[in-house]
Image (spheres, rainbow, N blue to C red):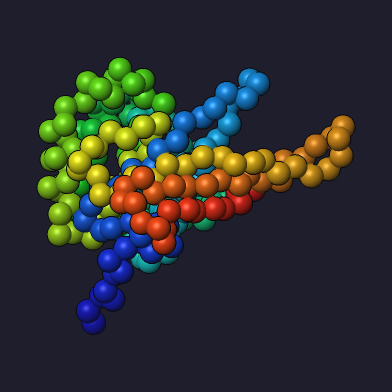
Amino acid sequence: MEPLPLPDRLASFAGLPRGHISEIIGSRLGVRSSGRSSGRTALAHAILAESIALGEICALVDWANSFDPATAHRNGVALEKLLWVQCGHQPDRALKVADLLLHTGGFGVVALDLCDVPPSTLRRIPLSWWHRFRRAIENTPTILLIAGNQPVAGSCAACVIEMEQKRTHWSGSEHVPLFAGIETQGTSRKPIRAESVLLRASMAG
């Protein structure tokens, strides 16, 4: 029996094109002692969950060892279908691991988490890496999903989604507030398409 054909895009999330690089960007804004989430991690989890639901194996290259399996599981990611590689705050190692995975092939989504890498470090990444990654996944069903504070892949990226938190929802009383969720908005910076510019979601927990 031949395998079922895969969709050309992960259509539920801004139509991420297969065989291309996509980026999710958004910075954490300081609110008191904690950060204000932009929603980029939750969106990345949703994309991984959708790919896995299609029967694919996914990989996460985690430069800062910041991936939280419990949160990902709550967001629908089947952890047994996810290869998680910790890179100990070493961007060079993260790039080399991503390169190995992309050239090995067989993954629906390879997520490269560069969130909170210092801008000075990002600027030192040679453009040749992104060209190499783009060539590695051309004409394949694999998506390279880069999550970070700012775009890094330049012209090599086919899709850039900027995430922003719009509001936080609370329940409970004034004296004992309970977190009920956040509402985020995603704007497609590349390509600019009127029918898919805005993405909104309420994410609890």
User: Of 176 and 55, which appears nearest the observer?
Assistant: 176
Q: Where does the image place residue 123, in percent across and percent down from the top left?
A: 25, 22
Give the residue at the far bottom of this rendering.
Answer: 1
At 56% from the left edge and 40% from the top edge, which residue is drawn? Answer: 165
Q: Give residue 4's position: percent from left, percent from top.
A: 28, 76
Residue at the image position 36 percent from the left and 32 percent from the top: 150
Q: Position of residue 68 (x, y in %)?
A: 50, 38
Q: Nearer the viewer, residue 73 or 50?
A: 50
Residue 122 visible within the image: yes
Q: Quadrant of the N terminus?
A: bottom left
Q: Residue at x 45, y 36 (%)?
A: 26
Tally of marks: 0
120 relative to 26, above or below:
above
Task: Identify the image quadrant of residue 11.
Answer: bottom left
In the foreground, 16 or 41: 16
Residue lying furthest front in this view? 194
Residue 60 makes an appearance in the image: no
